[in-house]
Structures are given as C-alpha cells and as structure tokens.
Image: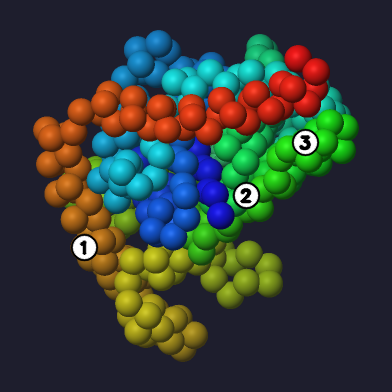
Amino acid sequence: MRIFSGIQPTGVLHIGNYLGAVRRWVELQETAECLYCVVDYHALTSEASSPDELGGAWRGLVLDLMACGIDPDRAILFRQSDVPEHTELCWILSCVTSFGDLARMTQFKEKSRGQQFVNVGLFIYPVLQAADILLYLADHVPVGEDQLQHLELARRIARRFNGRYGEVFPEPEPLLGEGARIMSLADPERKMSKSAGPEHVVGLFDPEDEIRAKVRTAVTDTGLTPGQDMSPGVANLFRLLELVAPGEVVEAFKGDHAAGRLMYRDLKASLQEHLLTTLAPLRERRRELAVSVDVEAVLAGGAERARAIARAVIADARQCVGL
Ligand code: TRP
C-alpha cells in the first residue's frame, strides 16, 4: 500500500486540517509507505498568492505538520516544486483528460464563478492533482469529502492512460476519515477553510483564549435542517467533540440532547476543554521544533526520496506515450 496526500501552503494549519486529515496521516505512516506533499504549484492557482507569502508559507507548514506527528524519517515529506516531474506528468495526463470533465468540476465552478479573470491553472488543477498521485503509483489517498470528485477524475485519467498506452498507473482509492467534514464555527453551512477568511477557521496554534472565544461564539441557532434533529452548528460541535473527547462524554451530551435538556453552554465548555487538552502537546512540540529543525534539510531529504520514485515512473510514462 502506498499513500499520497497533499496540502496547500496557504495560511495556518487549522483544526479541520488536523482532525479531518493530518491526524490520519500520522497513523498511516505507521503501516504504509506514505508521501506527504506541500503542494505549492497548486497554491499558485490562487489569485491571492504572492511571492512573499508563497516563499515563506512552506516553512511554517512543515513545522506544523511535524508538530502534528508527521515524521520525515518515516513518511516522505516534500515540496511539490522540488520535484518538477509533477508538471511533466501533468502535461502528459492533460492529453488524456477530457475538457468536459474538467468543466464539470465543482471546485472549479465555485472558484471561477463571478471572477473576471479565470486562470487556466485553476482549470487544470485536478490534472496536476492526478499527476501528484499517479507519479508515485499511489493506490490510496486520504482526503476530505470535498476532494472525492477530483479523485474520481484521477481514476478516470489513469484508466484512459492505461487503456490507450498500457497498464502503468493503479487507480487510486480514497481513504475517507471520520472527521472528513468539519464546518466553520462562524457559519456551519460551509466547510472550515482558510480561503473562507480568518473568522471561519480555528488555527491549531492560535492562542488558547482565541480558541475558547471561537468555540464560545460558535453559531448554534440557525434552525433545523429538514430530516435532522440538530441544527448544522450543533451537529458540528458534536462532530468535533467526538474527535477530541472520550465516548462517554459525547454519549452524556447526546442523552441530554435527546431529552431536550442540552445546554449549549455546557457542550461548548466541554469542547473547549477537550480540544485544548488534545492540542496542548502539539503546541509544545511546535515550540521545540521551531528552534531545533532545519526545514530546508528536511525538505531536501524528502525531495531526494520522492524524486527517486518519480524519475522511474516518468521514464516509464514517457516511453509508453512514445517520447
Ligand atoms: N486539492 C487538495 C486540497 O485542496 C490538495 C491536493 C493537491 C491533494 N494534490 C493532492 C490531495 C493529491 C490529495 C492528493 O485539499
């Protein structure tokens, strides 16, 4: 089993990233060969990206990931732009990708809607993502629900390449985690995401009083979704609590909710405590790593290992297509 996943170097790591994805990555590195990639080529598709930000963001992200438990001696932790084979494979794969398929991608439609200038990078973003995965012949990809469509496309691309040129790429399967859908505390109808704005994310390493305040002011009273017995905000608080608190704590609050006597204030207080307890060791490690780790050396080591795999696969792909 070979695992690949990627994360964009934009802004700080937040609890949605950690509880929804990175915590899973840490577990997976115990049992599988894992590649974790800081996808800076992808970050270029954002009109908001600036050279200063992009040039500095990866350092913090690598330290954040290591503080979460990613171990560069086990997993291959590297930066996408250090392995230019990603862009070469992207080109080759773009020639077996349907324009219509790309035009149907929800993320593209959302990000391009209402924009005056839509860059082609945003359009072919999913092809580069497919190249990321296929370049390492990865068979499993831990992602959030919002990436399932991109992964399905990666499978189609692999299938079309293999059908036309011969079996090179396995069709990668998604690995969906339990925390795959953590919503914004300020607007529980939307995913917790850096691109939504600072009020929508709880940074992993935010000061404790800020984390408390964001949980305390979390929106709960938006009314019920039809067919559900909880408002989206309350359901989101329960989802978070399940990820950080022991089962019996969650069960007790669920019992209160079922009996109609749940006090949101108590639910939030419990979430604050369990969340901060979960994050405390990460903060401690983040502080230590900031002074002890040579991030450039970590990435250089990761790139060397990644490139050894990538070179062999790209050579194979080039030969298959006749280059
Ligand atoms: N598109 C992914 C996201 O926004 C990031 C990503 C890029 C990725 N390449 C990948 C994820 C390859 C998994 C595999 O979250």
Quadrant of the rendered image containing residue 64: top left
Colouring convention used in this rendered image of the protein: rainbow
Could you give the CA–CA distance between mark 3 and mark 2, rounded to whole angstroms?
A: 14 Å
Disc 3 packing (10 Å; few <14; some 14–19; many ≥20): many
Mark 1, ligand 1, within 8 Å: the answer is no
* Tag shown at residue 157: 3
- First in sequence: mark 1 vs mark 2: 2
Residue type at mark 3?
Answer: Ile
- x and y percentages locating residue 10 in the rendered image: 42, 29
The label on residue 277 is 1
Nearest to the observer: residue 39 or residue 302: 302
Q: Nearer the viewer, residue 118 or 29?
A: 29
> The N terminus lies in which quarter of the figure?
bottom right
Mark 1, secondary structure of its residue: helix
Tell me if I can see residue 206 in this picture. Answer: yes
Q: Nearer the viewer, residue 250 or 297?
A: 297
Q: Which residue is mark 2?
A: 139
Disc 3 is placed on an element classified as helix
Cα distance in 3D space between marks 3 and 1: 43 Å
Crowdedness near tag 1: few (<14), some (14–19) or many (≥20) residues, C-alpha within 10 Å: few
Q: Amino acid at mark 1?
A: Thr
